[in-house]
Image (cartoon, rainbow, N blue to C red):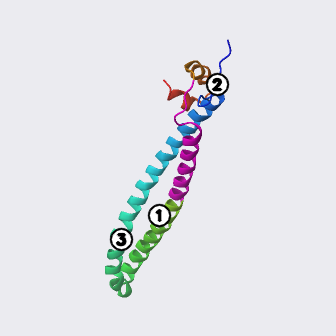
Amino acid sequence: MAKTYRAGVMTPETLAACLILAHRIDAVATEIETAKGTIRDLDGRIQEAGPRLQHQAMAALTDPERRKAYEAQIADYNAWVEERRGAVEGHNRQVRLYSEMSGRFNGECNGRSYFPSDLDAVKGGLPPTVAARLQ
């Protein structure tokens, strides 16, 4: 006997797409958390280095050895600022992607039911990382 998919019941194709989408949403959420940690780390380095470099600036003007060390520290500082800028841009892109995918999931998947036999049927066709989550 054929199944009847009434409103609110996912077809096997929709179920598989929703499982994959949920996995991708979780992956993006992990990337967002990683980016936050990177940004916090860079913020700490930048905030610590700024006052120290200001304090060393005068000595660097008069002492050639200190100037070399100071210039190297300035280069590190500038690299951290640039790396932070890139990390923030990447983080913001991931947040937008997460929001878009979550909206799609909420509209297409959330709160909809499925036949358990359909879940069993689609498991074999899912990417291994998605299928592993269903164990």
For residue 132, side relative to residue 2 (left or right)? left
Question: Start and end of the magenta stretch?
Answer: 90-114
First in residue order: circle 3 vs circle 2? 2
Judging from the image, what secondary structure is the residue with disc 2 in?
Answer: loop
> Which residue lies under the disc numbered 1?
84
First in residue order: circle 1 vs circle 3? 3
Nearest the viewer among 129 and 17 is: 17
The mark closer to the camera, 1 or 3, is 1
> Which residue lies under the disc numbered 2?
5
Nearest the viewer among 6 and 20 is: 6
Judging from the image, what secondary structure is the residue with disc 1 in?
Answer: helix
**Residue 49 image label:** 3
Q: How many residues crowd around disc 3 within 10 Å: few (fewer than 14), some, or many (20 or more)?
A: some
- Residue 108 picture quarter: top right
Residue 122 percent location from the top left of the image: 61, 24
Q: How many residues crowd around disc 1 within 10 Å: few (fewer than 14), some, or many (20 or more)?
A: many
Marks 1/2: CA–CA distance: 49 Å
